[in-house]
Image (spheres, rainbow, N blue to C red):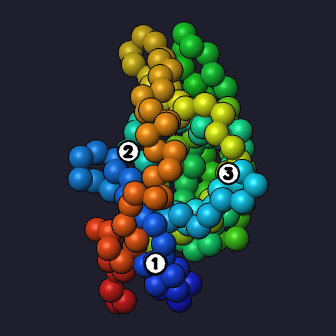
Amino acid sequence: MSGVSKLLYRFTAGRPCRLIHRHKNERYLERYWLGRVFGVTAYLHRFVARDADDWVHDHPWGWSVAIVLTGRYQEERLKWFDPAVGWTSVFRVLRAGRINIIRGQDFHRITDCQPETWTLFIHGPRRKGWGFLEKSEAVVCYYQPYDTAVSHQWHTRVPTGRNADRAPLPRAA
């Protein structure tokens, strides 16, 4: 584990922390609120596991940027979509120092991540809800399952990292 990971873990102990789960009690992301200035919001993301879904999602903001600070993750990004057939994707690995630009209409998912992968995640104003494309045997469905108004001010109602049930740092080998 890198010294940067340890430093980020200590820093985020005092930041509002939202634990995001894949399935019941199976966390995949820790989101730490950094702040909002002129409609631009910043977080630190600590990946604990890959995205839970076998389908891709878009983001509710017009644009977002993820800067990989430590570790690496593999992203599946939708390249082409036909509602009757499904989608074609490209896969890429983003390592520390890489920048990932995600527009609101881009569909993607994290298919793999190295432990202690941290990103600085920045986004613009909200434009819509989260959207998901789900494949079934004969069709692809688009849906928006979350009420965006409920989570808008989440950082005012959550514990700080030190008081959240966040994953401990891995022990050095």
Nearer the viewer's eye, disc 1 or disc 2? 1
Identify the disc placed on residue 109: none
Amino acid at dot 2: Ala
Residue 83 visible: yes
User: Hey, what amino acid is under mark 3?
Assistant: His
Q: Residues within 10 Å of mark 2 (few under 14, many from 20)?
A: some
Judging from the image, what secondary structure is the residue with disc 1 in?
A: loop
Q: Is residue 122 above or below residue 77?
A: below
User: Foreground residue, 106 or 41?
Assistant: 41
Q: Examine the rendered structure and indicate whether residue 171 appears above or below residue 41.
A: below
Type of amino acid at the residue the image marks with label 1: Gly
Q: Please indicate whether residue 71 sits to the left or right of residue 24 in the image.
A: right
- At horizontal 43% and vertical 48% (from top left) the residue drawn is 51
Measure how far apart labels 2 and 3 are at the Cα level: 22 Å
- SS under mark 2: loop
Circle 3 or circle 1, nearest the eye: 1
Q: x, y (%) of residue 110?
A: 51, 49
| Residue at image location 40% in from the left, 72% down from the top | 161
Location of mark 1 (residue): 14
Would you place residue 58 above or below residue 14 in this image?
Answer: above
Q: Residue furthest right?
A: 38
Mark linked to residue 123? 3
Label 1 vs label 2: CA separation?
Answer: 27 Å
Mark 2, residue position: 52
- 154 and 145: which is toward the camera: 154
Q: Position of residue 9 (x, y in %)?
A: 46, 80
Kindly state the secondary structure of the residue where label 3 is placed: strand
